[in-house]
Image (cartoon, helix red, strand yellow):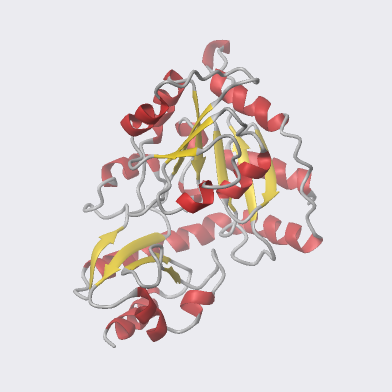
């Protein structure tokens, strides 16, 4: 498949009207490259674990960070801005993750989608963690879904790829969704050159699209098993996983996420730092590629902090739990 055929395949996968593939290190970088957030716009963001990435790349449109992924927080940050759905703008952008931020929050995308249209805002969802397998933002009210394709590519792509998908604008009874129509006009007119994919990259992405459902279900199932193990482990605390009833967004997540509750678990260490845990673990837990078969750990608050984020691979969760247990006991 060429780039055009892969973009068409992603349109079907995401239930979109149009899609673009971009080479970018993460979703904020891809959004900046697309050039659709322009000077004079306002970008309101909940992504407290990614604040630095939004601090640059949006000249003339400083990102406003909110502390909660709630309608009230986004509405408050949007007050006084006269937004338009005309192509000329100015445009008001609301950006959340389907799963993301410290604590792996899950926002009510339906409520945000309704409120965004009332405020003449364009709702963008970073769908990287949940993936198109685990969440359908465009069906829930987003006009733009952006997803880093690490898991689609199973961690095998030689560079980071991101897909941006825009919602269909045709509603029932011949009505048109003005927000989706605006997003489509902006994406269509962004002027970004078509991505130049090598044959190896195209083959990896094509194979990834063919196998994503089976692999993502394995990631999700193993994340749940590891979350339950960690929740019962007295050597850690504050386990955050949307599938646990203790998670603040568990009820919302049951109506937003599909096929489970995502591949990620977050927890806090007791009596040691992330750096000390990493030193006690095999290197592959830190160095394996994002989205690959091996379970991967990171320190979202820094190595001297106590917070760990785990992305489940497709490896044996019993073996992963045993390895973690040994490292925690050192």
On the rendered image, what quadrant is the C terminus found in?
bottom left
Q: Position of residue 26 (x, y in %)?
A: 58, 53
Residue 221 is drawn in which quadrant?
bottom left
Looking at this view, is 144 or 199 the one in front? Answer: 144
Residue at image location 40% in from the left, 79% down from the top:
278
Which residue is depicted at the point 61% across and 56% down?
Answer: 25
From the viewer's side, name the closer residue of 291 and 85: 85
Q: Is residue 189 above or below residue 82?
A: below
Kindly identify the residue that appears in the image at 70 percent across and 55 percent down: 206
Provide residue 128's location: percent of width, then percent of height: 51, 51
- Vertical position of residue 249 compared to residue 115: above or below: below
Question: Residue at the front extreme?
Answer: 60
- Decide if residue 256 is in sight here: yes
The number of numbered badges drawn on the structure is: 0
User: Does residue 177 appear in this view?
Assistant: no
Q: Which x, y percent locates residue 211?
A: 60, 58
Q: Left or right of 197: which side holds 116?
A: left
Place of residue 321 in the rendered image (x, y in percent of width and height, measured from the top left): 34, 77
- In the image, 206 versus 70, the foreground residue is 70
Say whether residue 98 is left or right of residue 266.
right
């Amino acid at each position: 498949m060429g780039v055009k055929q892969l973009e068409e395949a992603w349109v079907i996968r995401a239930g979109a009207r149009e899609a673009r593939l971009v080479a970018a290190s993460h979703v904020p970088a891809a959004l900046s490259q697309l050039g659709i957030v322009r000077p004079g716009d306002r970008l309101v963001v909940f992504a407290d674990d990614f604040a630095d990435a939004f601090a640059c790349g949006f000249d003339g449109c400083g990102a406003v960070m909110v502390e909660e992924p709630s309608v009230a927080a986004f509405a408050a940050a949007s007050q006084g801005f006269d937004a338009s759905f005309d192509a000329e703008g100015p445009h008001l952008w609301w950006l959340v993750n389907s799963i993301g931020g410290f604590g792996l929050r899950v926002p009510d995308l339906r409520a945000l989608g309704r409120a965004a249209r009332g405020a003449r805002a364009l709702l963008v969802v970073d769908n990287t963690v949940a993936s198109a397998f685990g969440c359908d933002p465009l069906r829930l009210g987003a006009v733009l879904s952006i997803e880093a394709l690490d898991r689609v590519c199973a961690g095998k792509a030689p560079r980071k790829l991101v897909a941006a998908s825009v919602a269909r604008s045709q509603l029932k009874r011949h009505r048109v969704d003005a927000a989706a129509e605006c997003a489509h006009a902006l994406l269509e007119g962004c002027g970004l050159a078509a991505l130049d994919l090598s044959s190896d990259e195209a083959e990896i992405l094509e194979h990834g699209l063919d196998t994503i459902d089976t692999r993502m279900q394995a990631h999700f199932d193993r994340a749940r098993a590891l979350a339950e193990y960690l929740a019962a482990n007295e050597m850690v605390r504050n386990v955050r996983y949307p599938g646990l009833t203790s998670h603040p967004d568990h009820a919302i997540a049951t109506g937003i996420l599909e096929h489970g509750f995502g591949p990620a678990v977050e927890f806090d260490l007791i009596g040691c730092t992330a750096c000390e845990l990493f030193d006690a673990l095999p290197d592959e837990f830190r160095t394996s590629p994002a989205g690959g078969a091996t379970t991967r750990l990171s320190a979202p608050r820094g190595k001297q902090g106590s917070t760990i984020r785990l992305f489940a691979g497709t490896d044996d969760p019993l073996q992963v739990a045993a390895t973690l247990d040994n490292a925690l006991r050192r």
